[in-house]
Amino acid sequence: MNLFELQNSFWRIDEYENFSGNETRLYFYLIHLANRSFWAEWIEYADKKMVANANISLQVLKSARERLKNANLIDFVAGGGFRVKTKYQILIPSSTSKPSPYTNIKTKDKNINTNTYGKKKGFIHSGSDFD
């Protein structure tokens, strides 16, 4: 797993999803935990500890991890009960990513609308600066 690919993939997806600061913090904290655990396939981490270390509330944690899961950045299995930790998995970015939102922007053609001085709008152009 390449850390730079994960980071670039996150920011590329963020252009579409517009993640909040809490979601971003949670994702990069999970990457930190994965790196610290030598990129184990699943990371187990208690919700109360995650809330304290990521400095977010439990409700924000639940909504943030759900949003990251919907964006195919992570997968998780929620802990169910006393002392049952949530399992997290960092997903490998897919090679077929969404195209950049900037590819469909139309730019002006320099051959169009040059030196018209309002002729197309019905102006009578006399060459004066006061038209």
Image (spheres, grey):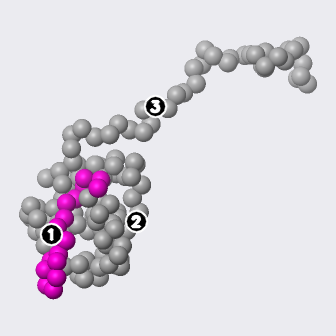
**Hey, what amino acid is under mark 3?**
Asn
**Percent coordinates x, y for residue 61 in the rendering:** 31, 72
Please tell me which residue is depicted at 52% across the width and 28% down the height of the picture.
Answer: 106
Quadrant in the rendering for residue 25: bottom left
Q: Earlier in the sequence, mark 3 or mark 2?
A: 2
Task: Give the residue number, with chain letter if any, for mark 2.
Answer: 21
Please tell me which residue is depicted at 76% across the width and 16% down the height of the picture.
Answer: 120
**Is label 3 in a helix, a strand or a loop?**
loop
**Percent coordinates x, y for residue 6 in the rendering:** 23, 52
The image's mark for residue 9 is none
Q: Is residue 53 above or below residue 65?
A: below
Q: How many numbered discs?
A: 3
**Is label 2 in a helix, a strand or a loop?**
helix
Q: Are marks 3 and 2 in contact (CB under 8 Å)?
A: no
Please tell me which residue is depicted at 60% across the width and 19% down the height of the picture.
Answer: 110
Task: Give the residue number, with chain letter if any, for mark 1.
Answer: 87
Quadrant in the rendering for residue 80: bottom left
Q: Is residue 119 above or below residue 96?
A: above
Nearest the camera: 115 or 76? Answer: 76
The range drawn in magenta is 70-85
Q: Are marks 2 and 1 in contact (CB under 8 Å)?
A: no
Q: Earlier in the sequence, mark 3 or mark 1?
A: 1
The image's mark for residue 104 is 3
Q: Is residue 83 above or below residue 106?
A: below
